[in-house]
Amino acid sequence: MDSKIPYVYILASKKNGAIYVGVTSNLIQRTWQHKNSETQGHTSKYHIKRLVYFEKHESMEEAIIREKQIKAWKRQWKINLIEKESHEWKDLWEKIIS
């Protein structure tokens, strides 16, 4: 996985738990930081470490627009997006590092 590609990602504490929507140009590094509590704030406070969704974008500007769009959604819409890919909310960490 290329380290300089813009991604929008969703992390969760568990199935139907607390969620976080973010944007990054290095999905592996950013996910690792969340998993190892190197980020302060919402994700560390609520133990949000499971990568449950991500999407690749052509530019950072496009990714930021999409991140803002998803953040503005109702919670159920975010859940539907996650479950479209994984009904069990599986951690996608292994998928991105292999």
Image (cartoon, rainbow, N blue to C red):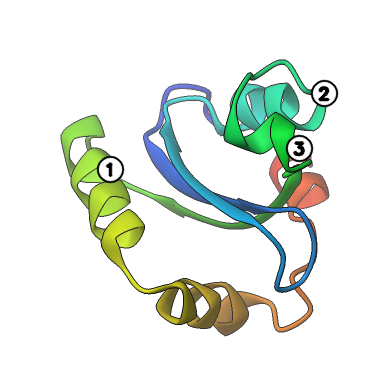
**Residue 58 seen:** no
- 42 versus 54 height, above or below: above
Give residue 13's quadrant in the image.
bottom right
Location of residue 30 by image quarter: top right
Secondary structure found at label 2: loop
**Residue drawn 22% across the image and 35% down it:** 59
Mark 1 or 3: the one toward you: 1
Residue at 77% from the left image edge and 23% from the top image edge: 37
Q: Is residue 6 above or below residue 15?
A: above
Please tell me how crowded label 3 is: few (under 14), some (14-19), or many (20+) other residues with Cα within 10 Å: few
Circles 2 and 1: CB atoms closer than 8 Å: no
Q: CA distance from mark 2 to mark 1?
A: 24 Å
Q: Which residue is mark 1?
A: 63
Position of residue 57 measured from the top left corner of the image (x, y, whole percent):
31, 46
* Dot 2 alpha-carbon crowd within 10 angstroms: few under 14, some 14 to 19, many 20 or more: few
Relative to 5, 96 lies left or right: right
User: Camera-side residue: 45 or 57?
Assistant: 45
In percent of the image, x 37 and y 35: which residue is there? 6
The answer to whether residue 23 is seen in the rendering is yes
Answer left or right for 14 relative to 68: right
User: Residue 36, labelled with which disc?
Assistant: 2
Q: CA distance from mark 3 to mark 2?
A: 15 Å
- Judge from the rendering whether residue 93 lies leftward or rightward of residue 71; answer left or right: right
Asked if labels 2 and 3 touch by Cβ distance under 8 angstroms, the answer is no
The location of residue 23, given as percent across then percent down, is 41, 36
Q: What mark, if any, has residue 97 been given in the picture?
A: 3
The percent position of residue 50, horizontal first and vertical second, equals 76, 50
